[in-house]
Amino acid sequence: MAINRYYSATAQDTALTAFATSSTTAIVVGATTGFPTSYPYVLALDYGASAEELVSVTGAAGLTLSVSRAFNGTANVAHNVGAVVRHVIVAQDMTEMQAHIAATGAVHGITGSAATFLANPTSANLQAAVLDETGSGSLVFGTAPTLSGTVVVSGDINLTATNAQGSLTDQLTLILMGAL
């Protein structure tokens, strides 16, 4: 599961003000102007150099940033005072976004029969999504959903509709004939 990362369009480059060993998990920078205030977010240490390393910032206390090292497949290496530090978007961000776009189910917290219907929109899966998960047949919705606009249907349509006055078959027939 992807973890939400945070971004800023106004983050300004800064520099390390203390040496960072290859295992340091707290780096000290000269400024955090425009950096995200929620965590995690990604920084490149030694930006643009052969020693560039991506780190995930997990917290901050003033100018000291808590980081997870060697993010997104980079190697954890030592970084000297003055190393350029830049807030960046990384390949993992784009990969996770594309995977989310391509997903046909289990996104946005949707699970169970609703996710099944979204992944495979058959009438049986729609019926299961509309009925509650206990199988008692109660509607998940306060009222049954209404389709509006253009509805494309392939296959047979079986309608059963009643109200307190009895069958609505004649009314449905007129509605359907008028739409043909």
Image: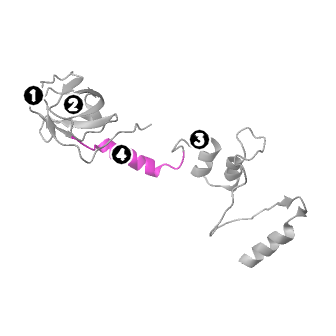
Local secondary structure at mark 4: helix
Residue at position x 85%, y 66% in the image: 168
Relative horizontal placement of residue 118, taking residue 172 as reference (left or right): left
| Label 1 packing within 10 angstroms: few (<14), some (14-19), many (20+) | some
Residue 164 position in % (x across, y down): 89, 58
Q: Is residue 122 magenta?
A: no
Quarter where residue 88 is shown: top left
Residue at position x 41%, y 38% in the image: 2
Magenta stretch in the rendered image: 87-105
Q: On residue 80, which mark appears?
A: 1
Residue at position x 80%, y 69% in the image: 172
- Sequence-wise, which precedes: disc 2 or disc 3? 2
Residue 7 position in % (x across, y down): 31, 43
Q: Nearer the viewer, mark 3 or mark 4?
A: 3
Question: Which residue does the numbered mark 3 point to in the structure image?
Answer: 111
Q: On residue 75, which mark appears?
A: 2
Local secondary structure at mark 3: loop
Question: Which residue does the numbered mark 4 point to in the structure image?
Answer: 95
- The amino acid at mark 4 is Thr
| Location of the N terminus (image quadrant) | top left
- Sequence-wise, which precedes: disc 2 or disc 1? 2
Q: CA distance from mark 4 to mark 1?
A: 31 Å
